[in-house]
Image (tube, coloured by chain):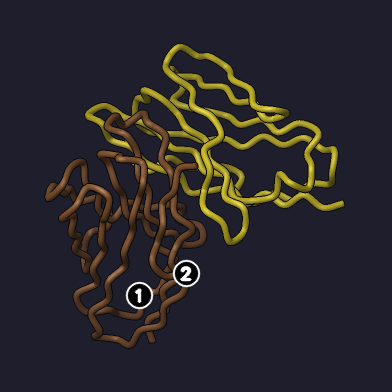
Chain colours: A yellow, B brown
Amino acid sequence: QQPVQSPQAVILREGEDAVINCSSSKALYSVHWYRQKHGEAPVFLMILLKGGEQKGHEKISASFNEKKQQSSLYLTASQLSYSGTYFCGTELSGNQFYFGTGTSLTVIP
Amino acid sequence: DVKVTQSSRYLVKRTGEKVFLECVQDMDHENMFWYRQDPGLGLRLIYFSYDVKMKEKGDIPEGYSVSREKKERFSLILESASTNQTSMYLCASSRQGAEDIQYFGAGTRLSVL
């Protein structure tokens, strides 16, 4: 029931774009995205509710395809400050919530 | 500012010791969680609590127990620490719904020798 994220790790140069995918085998009610910088607590980025909406946060946006049980996080024109580990969190029926396997993102100058 | 505080950033214990990890939140949240973070495995739920004295097992509860005597405090207990429990432990809290944002502590890195 833990969602699978891909890629597991990615290295980008500043200004490049990246996509992180989160895929579940179960029907989803909502998807959360969190970022954890090295040595720090994970921090909430955004939530996507059922309905296929797309949300944005600075140059980071996400989509939610409930039919495919997938969400994608889009990072455009990446900055050094985007480095960290990104986690999706998926809400299933019955108040169940699972975090994904994580994606390590490194942005280099 | 919301705050989740874990009592220790680093702990080193010996095999067989009883270990207590403490977590305190100041947001009056109903839900509290303990996760374990390992490379490639993401965040895995050990236990969560939705109210004082209430607890539910997560995905990997074996070898762990929890205690929630007060709303703001949630403790994780390793009854007899083993080397395979060496990991990063993260505490989180949220309001009542599963869709609610989770606020995390900075984590405790536990090494069991």
Where does residue A49 sit, x and y in percent of width and height?
A: 44, 19
Kind of residue indicated by mark 2? Arg
How far, Cα to Cα, is label 1 from label 2? 19 Å
Crowding near the residue tagged with mark 1, few <14, some 14–19, many ≥20 C-alpha atoms within 10 Å: few
B67 or A53: which is nearer to us?
A: B67
* Residue in the image at 31% along x and 32% along y: B98
Q: Earlier in the sequence, mark 1 or mark 2?
A: 2
Mark 1: secondary structure? helix
Q: The residue under label 1 is which amino acid type?
A: Asn
- Find the residue positioned furthest to the top: A51
Horizontal relation, residue B78 to residue A12: left or right = left
> Which residue: 63% across, 22% down?
A56
**Residue identifier under label 2:** B9
Instruction: Pick whichever, A43 or B16, lies toward us.
Output: A43
Residue at position x 44%, y 37% in the image: A89
Residue A64 in the image, given as x and y percentages of width and height: 51, 21
- Asked if B50 appears above or below A59 in the picture, the reply is below
* Mark 1 belongs to chain: B
Q: Where is residue A36 in the image (x, y as percent from the top left)?
A: 57, 50
Q: Is residue A69 above or below residue B94?
A: above
Q: Horizontally, is A44 left or right of A17 in the view?
A: left
The residue that label 1 is drawn on is B84
Q: Residue B77 or A10: which is nearer the viewer?
A: B77
Picture residue at 37% right of the left edge, 25% below the top: A28
Q: Position of residue B4 (x, y in %)?
A: 41, 51
Residue count near mark 2 (Cα–Cα under 10 Å), binned few <14, some 14–19, many ≥20: some
Parent chain of label 2: B
Circle number at residue B62? none
